[in-house]
C-alpha cells in the first residue's frame, strides 16, 4: 500500500514537470504563421538577390569573354602582321647575305681571260662534286625508315636504284635551270638572276624532299659563283673593249697632235726662211741706195721683219716645248644643253696646238647640237689637272660603268670654284652657254606649233 502511494506521488510530480515544459514550448498559432511569412519573405529576397547576382555574373563573364576574344583577335592580327614583316625582312636579309657572299670585288683585278680560266676551274669542281656524290645529299635516316619496311632484298635494291636515278635527274634539272639563268644574264639583272637561282634551288629541294634527297648547299654556292663569274667575264670583256677603243682614240689623237706639231714647225720654218730672205734682200737694197727716204723705208721694213722673226722664234720654242712635254695641253669644260640638258658638263683634255679643233670634232654628227666652251685651261701637266677634276666630281659622274665618258652632273660654279682653288684663280669662265643651234631650233618649233 505504501508502495502504491509512493508511485502515485512520483507520477503526480512527473506530470507537473512535463506540463511546465510543455507550457514553456507552446507558442500560439498566429505567431508561428507570422514567423513563417517572415522566413518566406527573406527566402524570396535571397532568391531575387541570387538571381540578380547570377545575371550580373553572366553579363560580366560574357563581357570578359568578348574582351578576351577581341584581344585574341587583335593579338592574332598583330602576330600575322609581325610574321609578314619578319618574312619580308628575312627575304631582304637573305638577298643581302647572298650579295655580300658573292661580291665582285674579288674579281676586280682579273681580266676577261682570267675569268674564263676560273670558270673552267669551277666546272671541274662541279664535276668533282657530282663524281664524289656530294652534289646531292641523301637523308639516310628517312631512307632507312622506308627500306626497313617489310620489303624483300629485291625491292630494296630497286628502291636504291630509283634513289640514284632521282639524284641524276635532280642534278640534270638544276643544271638545266642554272644554265638557262646564266644565258639570260645582263648588267641590269644580275641581282634578280641570283635570286632566281636561289628560288630554283628551294623549289627543286621542296619537290624532291619526298624522295629523301636534297641539292647540297655547296653545289648551289658553286653555281652562284659561276653566275657571278660569267657576269664579270662579260663586264670585263666590255670594259676591255672600251679600253681598247680609248687606246685607239688616244693613239689617233696623239698622231693628230704629232702631225699638227710637224705642220706648225714646218710653217714656222717656212715663215722664218721667208723673213730672213726678205731681210737679206732689203739689206742689199739699203746698201745700194743713197736716198735717205728709201733707206728709212728699208730700215722700218727690216725692223718689222726682225720683230716677226723674234715672234716666230718664240712660237717655234713653244711648239718644241709642247713636242718635248707630252703632258702639256688644254683642259676644257664644255656643255651641250640641247643634247644632255642643263648642268651637265664634259671635262676633258687635248694636247692639240689649236684646242678648238678637238671641240669641233666632238660637235660632229654624234650629237645633234654643237658644244659650248665654258673654259679652256692651258696646263704644263694637263692630265694631272684633268684627273684632279674627275676625282673631285667622281660622285657626280653620269656614267658609273665607263668613266672615260667624262660627263658630270654639276654646276659651272662648282667647277670654277675647284679650278681656281686647286689650280689657277685667274682662269676665266663663261657661265651662260650660247647654245645657238638649240635655241634657234626651239624658236622654230615654237613658231610651227
Image: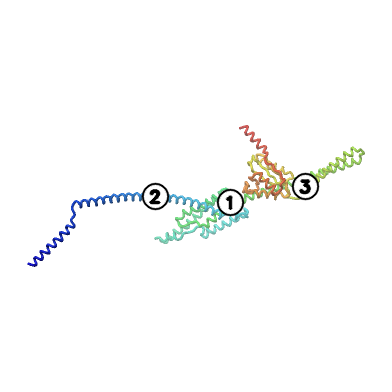
Q: Nearer the viewer, residue 429 or 62?
A: 62
- State the residue position of label 2: 67
* Other residues around mark 2 within 10 Å, as few (<14) / some (14–19) / many (≥20): few
Can you say whether 6 is above or below 282 in the image? below
Q: Disc 3 vs disc 1: which is toward the camera?
A: 3
- State the residue position of label 3: 318
Look at 57% across and 56% down and name the residue there: 122
Q: Mark 1 or mark 2, which has the lower sequence index?
A: 2
Residue 210 location, x and y as percent?
A: 44, 55
Q: Disc 2 vs disc 3: which is toward the camera?
A: 2
Q: CA distance from mark 1 to mark 2?
A: 58 Å
Q: Mark 2 or mark 3, which has the lower sequence index?
A: 2
Q: Left of 44 or right of it: where is 375? A: right
Classify mark 1: helix, strand or loop. helix
Where the C terminus falls, by quadrant?
Answer: top right
Classify mark 3: helix, strand or loop. helix
Q: CA distance from mark 3 to mark 1?
A: 49 Å
Look at 45% across and 50% down and name the residue there: 78
Q: Disc 1 vs disc 2: which is toward the camera?
A: 2
Q: Nearer the viewer, residue 407 or 320?
A: 407
Q: Which mark is residue 231?
A: 1
Where the N terminus falls, by quadrant?
Answer: bottom left
Whether the residues at callouts 2 and 3 have beta carbons within 8 Å, the answer is no
Q: Left of 156 or right of it: where is 337? A: right
Res. 154 visible in picture: no
Residue 256 location, x and y as percent?
A: 73, 46
Q: Left of 114 or right of it: where is 135? A: left
Amino acid at each position: 500500500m505504501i508502495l502504491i502511494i509512493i508511485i502515485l506521488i512520483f507520477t503526480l510530480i512527473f506530470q507537473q514537470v512535463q506540463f511546465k515544459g510543455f507550457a514553456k514550448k507552446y507558442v500560439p498559432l498566429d505567431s508561428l504563421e507570422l514567423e513563417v511569412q517572415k522566413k518566406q519573405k527573406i527566402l524570396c529576397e535571397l532568391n531575387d538577390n541570387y538571381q540578380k547576382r547570377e545575371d550580373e555574373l553572366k553579363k560580366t563573364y560574357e563581357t570578359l569573354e568578348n574582351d578576351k576574344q577581341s584581344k585574341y583577335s587583335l593579338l592574332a592580327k598583330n602576330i600575322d602582321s609581325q610574321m609578314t614583316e619578319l618574312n619580308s625582312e628575312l627575304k631582304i636579309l637573305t638577298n643581302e647575305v647572298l650579295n655580300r657572299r658573292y661580291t665582285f670585288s674579288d674579281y676586280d683585278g682579273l681580266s676577261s681571260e682570267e675569268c674564263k680560266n676560273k670558270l673552267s676551274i669551277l666546272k671541274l669542281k662541279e664535276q668533282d662534286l657530282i663524281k664524289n656524290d656530294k652534289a646531292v645529299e641523301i637523308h639516310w635516316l628517312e631512307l632507312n625508315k622506308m627500306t626497313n619496311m617489310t620489303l624483300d632484298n629485291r625491292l630494296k635494291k630497286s628502291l636504291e636504284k630509283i634513289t640514284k636515278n632521282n639524284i641524276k635527274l635532280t642534278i640534270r634539272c638544276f643544271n638545266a635551270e642554272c644554265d638557262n639563268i646564266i644565258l639570260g644574264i645582263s648588267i641590269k639583272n644580275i641581282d634578280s638572276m641570283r635570286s632566281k637561282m636561289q628560288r630554283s634551288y628551294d623549289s627543286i629541294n621542296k619537290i624532291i624532299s619526298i624522295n629523301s634527297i636534297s641539292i647540297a648547299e655547296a653545289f648551289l654556292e658553286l653555281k652562284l659563283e659561276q653566275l657571278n663569274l660569267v657576269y664579270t667575264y662579260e663586264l670585263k670583256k666590255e670594259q676591255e673593249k672600251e679600253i681598247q677603243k680609248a687606246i685607239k682614240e688616244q693613239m689617233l689623237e696623239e698622231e693628230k697632235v704629232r702631225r699638227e706639231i710637224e705642220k706648225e714647225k714646218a710653217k714656222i720654218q717656212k715663215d722664218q726662211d721667208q723673213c730672213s730672205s726678205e731681210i737679206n734682200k732689203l739689206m742689199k737694197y739699203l746698201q745700194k741706195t743713197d736716198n735717205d727716204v728709201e733707206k728709212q723705208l728699208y730700215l722700218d721694213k727690216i725692223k718689222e721683219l726682225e720683230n716677226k722673226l723674234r715672234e716666230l722664234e718664240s712660237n717655234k720654242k713653244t711648239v718644241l716645248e709642247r713636242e718635248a712635254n707630252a703632258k702639256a695641253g688644254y683642259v676644257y669644260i664644255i656643255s651641250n644643253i640641247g643634247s644632255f640638258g642643263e648642268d651637265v658638263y664634259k671635262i676633258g683634255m687635248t694636247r692639240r696646238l689649236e684646242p678648238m679643233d678637238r671641240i669641233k670634232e666632238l660637235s660632229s654628227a654624234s650629237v645633234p647640237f654643237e658644244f659650248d666652251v665654258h673654259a679652256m685651261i692651258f696646263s704644263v701637266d694637263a692630265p694631272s689637272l684633268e684627273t684632279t677634276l674627275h676625282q673631285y666630281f667622281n660622285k657626280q659622274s653620269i656614267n658609273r660603268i665607263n668613266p672615260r665618258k667624262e660627263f658630270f652632273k654639276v654646276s659651272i660654279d662648282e667647277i670654277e670654284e675647284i679650278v681656281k682653288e686647286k689650280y689657277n684663280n685667274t682662269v676665266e669662265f663663261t657661265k651662260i652657254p650660247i647654245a645657238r643651234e638649240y635655241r634657234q631650233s626651239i624658236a622654230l618649233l615654237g613658231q610651227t606649233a
